[in-house]
């Protein structure tokens, strides 16, 4: 493996970032330096969150309808059909193309739980992910710290993109050894001391003491303040306290995830950019020979769905029991359906391989 070190010139915000990118199959991923340091759309210093509580309620993609009837009866399901029901169409679209799998973790591979430290995936789901990685290049793309996600998943065959893609590592084994390389990309490494400082900042630490149920989690390149267990009457106070801390750090911005306030580096980088980086690293930049499939449940996954939609490339699959605004193409209701979809995809791939082998022998 050949590693190359490159330093980006200072941007207007005076952030200079050094990063390491590994060659995969002789291909060097190239990231636009100008695009990297544009402010995030959600950002600007201490983003002004108008109607904080309303936005916190909608901290996953906006629900369009809370109707009591079954999701399978909802008109929404016709706009965003089940990926299980449309499985044949998805596999047909992959003809002559390399499928690349992208999977969120919380709410996709594991159920959403009150304690984020106990978001364990089932053994059956782990087996499904392991099998899918033997068939296709597979990445876990999460807002969690990369090391924490690896601890949960425990599979060396995968790419891991933690901190919303700001910390990317490749597999150490798997997929026919073709992608047995390490990719390291950390576009905000210079800000790590600042993030550590904010995480240990007295005011931020006091939040967990003064607001019952709040939990601060250091995800290395971002800080997550979970409010899933906080009384809704205290959400506004929580938001204001977090904003008061972020306002003191102009190189950081505040955004919303699924029942979580997130403090991130003020750079234009998200799960969509991570998806593009991994595709480019694998040699599929601007390629018509690839079919990315991204499965996620959070509003942060919408950045990846938007990339696929804008490029007319692959499919986004939203995991949700409720109708939501989304740029995804298909839906699955819960992690158990994600597991079923992955298992079906593995079986389809293996059956296609068996047919190919028989055809080769007969010739």
Image: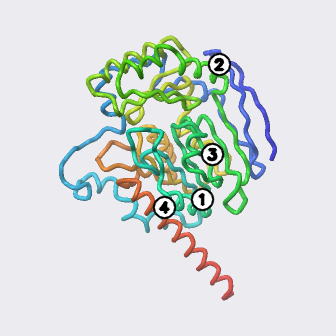
Q: CA distance from mark 2 to mark 3?
A: 24 Å
Mark 4 or mark 2: which comes first in sequence?
A: 2
Q: Report the front residue among 124 and 268.
A: 124
Q: Which mark is residue 74?
A: none
**Residue at (60, 78) in percent of width and height:** 354
Residue under label 3: 278
Q: CA distance from mark 1 to mark 3?
A: 15 Å
Asked if 208 appears above or below 278 in the picture, the reply is above
Q: Are dots 4 and 2 in contact, CB under 8 Å?
A: no
Q: Report the front residue among 20 and 99.
A: 20
Q: CA distance from mark 4 to mark 1?
A: 14 Å
Q: Are dots 2 and 3 in contact, CB under 8 Å?
A: no
Mark 2 or mark 1: which comes first in sequence?
A: 2
Kindly report which numbered mark, 2 or 1, lies closer to the viewer in this rendering: 1
- Could you tell me residue 57's position as x and y percent? 30, 32
Kindly report which numbered mark, 4 or 3, lies closer to the viewer in this rendering: 4
Q: CA distance from mark 2 to mark 1?
A: 36 Å
Residue under label 4: 124
Residue under label 1: 133
Residue count near mark 4 (Cα–Cα under 10 Å), binned few <14, some 14–19, many ≥20: few
Asked if 24 appears above or below 235 in the picture, the reply is below
Q: CA distance from mark 4 to mark 3?
A: 26 Å
Asked if 110 appears above or below 164 in the picture, the reply is below
- Could you tell me residue 298's position as x and y percent? 41, 41
Residue under label 2: 15
**Residue at (70, 43) in percent of width and height:** 183
Residue count near mark 2 (Cα–Cα under 10 Å), binned few <14, some 14–19, many ≥20: some
Of all residues shown, which one is farthest toward the bottom?
362
Of all residues shown, which one is farthest toward the right?
2
Of all residues shown, which one is farthest toward the left?
68
Q: Secondary structure at mark 4?
A: helix
């Amino acid at each position: 493996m050949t590693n190359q070190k490159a330093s980006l010139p200072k941007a207007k915000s005076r952030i200079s970032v050094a990063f390491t990118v590994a060659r995969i199959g002789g291909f060097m991923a190239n990231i636009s330096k100008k695009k990297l340091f544009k402010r995030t759309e959600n950002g600007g210093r201490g983003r002004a969150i108008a109607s904080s509580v309303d936005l916190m309620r909608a901290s996953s993609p906006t629900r369009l309808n809370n109707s009591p009837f079954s999701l399978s009866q909802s008109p929404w399901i016709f706009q965003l059909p089940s990926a299980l029901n449309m499985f044949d169409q998805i596999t047909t679209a992959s003809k002559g193309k390399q499928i690349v799998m992208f999977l969120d973790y919380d709410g996709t591979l594991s159920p959403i739980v009150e304690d984020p430290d106990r978001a364990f995936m089932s053994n059956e789901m782990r087996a499904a992910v392991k099998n899918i990685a033997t068939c296709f290049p597979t990445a876990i793309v999460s807002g969690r710290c990369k090391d924490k996600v690896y601890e949960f998943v425990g599979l060396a065959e995968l790419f891991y993109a933690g901190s919303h893609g700001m910390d990317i590592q490749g597999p150490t084994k798997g997929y026919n050894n073709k992608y047995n390389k390490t990719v390291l990309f950390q576009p905000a490494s210079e800000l790590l001391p600042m993030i550590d400082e904010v995480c240990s900042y007295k005011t931020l630490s006091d939040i967990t003491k003064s607001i019952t149920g709040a939990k601060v989690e250091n995800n290395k390149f971002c800080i997550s303040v979970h409010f899933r267990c906080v009384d809704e009457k205290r959400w506004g106070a929580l938001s204001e306290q977090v904003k008061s801390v972020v306002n003191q750090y102009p190189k950081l911005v505040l955004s919303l995830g699924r029942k979580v306030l997130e403090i991130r580096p003020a750079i234009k980088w998200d799960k969509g950019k991570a998806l593009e980086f991994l595709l480019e690293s694998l040699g599929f930049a601007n390629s018509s020979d690839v079919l990315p499939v991204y499965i996620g449940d959070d509003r942060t996954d919408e950045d990846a769905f938007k990339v696929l939609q804008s490029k007319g490339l692959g499919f986004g699959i939203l995991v949700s029991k409720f109708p939501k605004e989304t740029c995804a193409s298909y839906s699955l209701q819960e992690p158990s359906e994600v597991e079923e979809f992955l298992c079906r995809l593995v079986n389809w791939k293996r059956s296609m391989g068996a047919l190919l082998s028989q055809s080769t022998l007969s010739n």
